[in-house]
Image: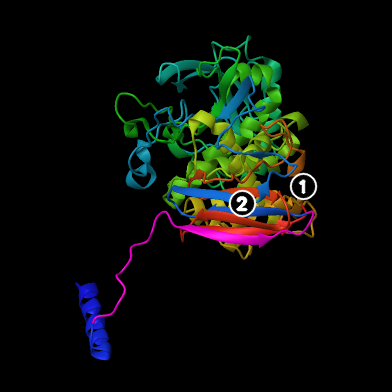
Amino acid sequence: MKRSFLFSLLMISAFLLSGCFLFEEEKQPDVAAIRTNTYTIPTGHSLYFVVHNLTTSTKNVAVWGDNLSLPSTTTKSLFGEIGALSPSVYPIMGLPSSFPQVIPTGNWRTQSPSTTKGMFTGETSTPIDYGYNPSNWVIGTTKLSFWVVNMVANKYSNITATLRAIGTNMTTGASPTSVAGGVAYIFVDDNDWGTRVTPAMITNLATNFNGAGGIYAKLTNVLGGYEDGGGPDGDGGVDNNRNIYILLHDIQDGFSGSGGFVGGYYAPINDFPTNYQPPDTYYSSAKQMFVIDAYPTLSLYPGFAVSTLIHEAQHMINFGQKYFVGGVQEETWLNEACSMIVEDILDEFVPASDRVYMNGSRLSFFVSEPERGLFRWNDADVLYDYGKSYAYLAFLARNTTPRIVKEIVSGAGRNKVGGAAVEAALSAVGAGKTFAESVKLWRKASIYNTTGLSSSWTGYRTNATVTGYELRALDLSTYNNDRSSTGPVFYYFRSSSKTFTFYPYSTFIFKGVPTSGNTVTVYISDDPQIEVEVIITNL
């Protein structure tokens, strides 16, 4: 109504001034409009045409060029081509999104009295301090039942597991009332004990995870918080016990010697009382816990199993901080990024060949598809999503401080998710960057790839601003990509219109050199929400 009235006033004014209606017909935007850009490229230089979709919408954008040839470095033409990076065996940490998980409605911590919490077997309602265990528990004898995920049958199954360690104590038959540095009860599925899981494996996990200098102590320091009910001042959470459970179990993921397998998982439903679980198909073990795969993870890849301990413990703490305290549930891409960055920060516990930043691991998948949408998470090619999520937070931690993960999980970003959580964390650490600005800088760092301390925001430099935690500099040019080459893979310019799908917060980088002379032309869809940055450099 207001727009029609204003338009009429403008037309009357035009008539009064000229004596007739002389005006152009109002035009609708042309969705097929093209921007034309001409550039002069000095000899020996390349043109990098950086195209950002910093929106939450998927965009179809046409890009092509005149007088532009492929540079000598690796480029590609089609989105999602998979070449050399097709491992015969590859791990996934966490349950695939295709497996149905339901978080019970509401926060039982604020809606129910403490009497709804399950009582610890043989104990009073008084929470147990760290280092103490029930007097009637005996290592090698005490058994408990657990609900576990069966992905093959697409349901939960119930298994029986036996206590094999309390803290760092693994003496069969021992029932100590105090275990210095105790944190975790390690239970092993009875079907896996003596075959897929051995006493030596228990020793390795228990000594790495527990104690004053172990993974849990350092992880909670890095993250600045605990799982629901945990910590020296916690109330014990769903089972009134401050200690946590690590269940070793052959996850039924369909692995038969090749293909993907699940290295471990944290299921949030276990943090809820059984009377809060959805009916029929979802079951809570009513314990602060996570699961580590017995086969092939623990049996064949013990170093990776330790890394998975770190990864899944972050998910457990993340849910406790974000859901029960902050009132939100973190987005998958950022939750996974937080788990991988703490694997990075605590790499001292992980053998060099199994570290998250090693060649053939996360960064190899990232450099293969550096354009990938930051928010995207797709089971079909999830290794690439792990790669880009890790790369983004690894970049931020090295250009700000490793403390940024603490701000995301338990600090300024605790009651926020995704980009909003990152932006709050960036502000808290004094980075002076918005979330969108940090994403653009991260994408362009694939071009500059600097590693020196003096070059901030242009690469994955080393950073040692948190005492005791020094992140290693990462040189992207040394990582294998899926084009049987090394370093980030960019796109080349087609000579005729080519449309690319830009998922939310994705960036495509096109690289070219003049076919002849020094002048080139680039064409791109004229979408005001698509941002373009042009870099002409001899890199």
Question: Which residue is outermost to the bottom?
Answer: 17
Magenta segment: does it hold 177?
Answer: no
Which residue is painted at 46% across and 29% down in the image? 120
Counting from the top left corner in percent of width and height, residue 203 is at 70, 23
Who comes first in sequence, dot 1 or dot 2?
Answer: 2
- Left or right side of 7 for 514: right
Mark 1: which amino acid? Ala
Image quadrant occupied by the N terminus: bottom left
Give the secondary structure at mark 1: loop
Quadrant in the rendering for residue 198: top right
- Left or right side of 477 for 385: left
Compare residues 431 and 508 and report the one nearer the observer.
508
Q: What residue would you read off at disc 1?
A: 473
Q: Are marks 1 and 2 in contact (CB under 8 Å)?
A: no
- Left or right side of 539 for 255: left
Mark 2 surroundings within 10 Å by alpha-carbon count, few (fewer than 14), some (14 through 19), many (20 or more): some
Counting from the top left corner in percent of width and height, residue 51 is at 56, 53
Whether 293 is drawn above or below 343: the answer is above
The span shown in magenta is 21-44
Q: Is residue 52 visible?
A: yes
Magenta segment: does it hold 31?
Answer: yes
Mark 1 or 2: in front is 2
Compare residues 242 and 444 and report the one nearer the observer.
444
Whether 299 is drawn above or below 177: the answer is above
Compare residues 289 and 25 and report the one nearer the observer.
25
Q: What residue would you read off at disc 2?
A: 66
Quadrant in the rendering for residue 269: top left
Counting from the top left corner in percent of width and height, residue 243 is at 55, 35
Quadrant in the rendering for residue 17: bottom left
